[in-house]
Image (spheres, helix red, strand yellow):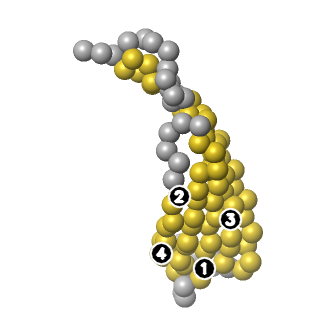
Amino acid sequence: MLTRTQDALLTLQGHAGYTFRSQLWLALNATWYAGGGAHIEGRRPGLRMNNSRAGLTLSLPAGGQQSIKIAYSAGTFARAGPNFRTVSVAWQKYWLTKR
């Protein structure tokens, strides 16, 4: 049976946001990751990732203690591995609030 190992995957994330008012904010997100090369039977790794992604997240008030989040992200550079786009929508309910 062949032995397969994988190098660690290093990641660095950055986020910057602006709050317009309570529950209404916009954020810019960026991620860079590298490494993850696979070794089979101790041989040098094949493809090592060196990729980056960027995205935006928008939070909109939805009445009371609720908000809707809309997010989009895309690969900005992909040397190896997946390069894809995502869109997500989430509903959020707040239980803990300031008094």
> Marks 4 and 2, Cα distance to the nearest angstrom?
21 Å
Q: At 39% across and 17% down in the image, what residue appears?
A: 40
**Which residue lies at the image location 44% right of the left edge and 19% below the top edge?**
39
Q: In this view, does 16 lie above or below 5?
A: below
Which of the two residues, 87 or 91, is positioned nearer the viewer here? Answer: 87
Which residue matches tag 3?
Answer: 27
Question: Which sits in the foreground, 22 or 40?
Answer: 40
Three-letter amino acid code at the position of disc 4:
Trp
Compute the Cα span from label 3 to label 2.
17 Å
Q: Are marks 4 and 2 in contact (CB under 8 Å)?
A: no
Q: Which of marks 3 and 4 is nearer the N terminus?
A: 3
Q: What element carries label 2?
A: strand
Q: Residues within 10 Å of mark 3 (few under 14, many from 20)?
A: some
User: Residue 60, which numbered label?
Assistant: 1
- Which label is found at residue 91? 4
Quadrant in the picture for the C terminus: bottom right
Of discs 3 and 2, which sits in the foreground?
2
The reply to whether the C-beta atoms of the residues labelled 2 and 1 are less than 8 Å apart is no
Q: Which of marks 4 and 2 is nearer the N terminus?
A: 2
Please identify, in this view, whether the residue under mark 4 or under mark 2 is nearer the observer: 2
Q: Which of marks 2 and 1 is in front?
A: 2
Looking at the image, how many numbered discs can be counted on the residues?
4
Q: How far apart are marks 2 and 1 (CA)?
A: 22 Å
Q: Is residue 55 left or right of residue 94?
A: right
Q: What element carries label 3?
A: strand
Residue 94 in sight in this render: no
| Mark 2 crowdedness (10 Å alpha carbons): few <14, some 14-19, many ≥20 | few
Residue that mark 2 sits on: 85
Badges 3 and 4: C-beta atoms under 8 Å apart?
A: no
| Secondary-structure class at tag 1 | strand
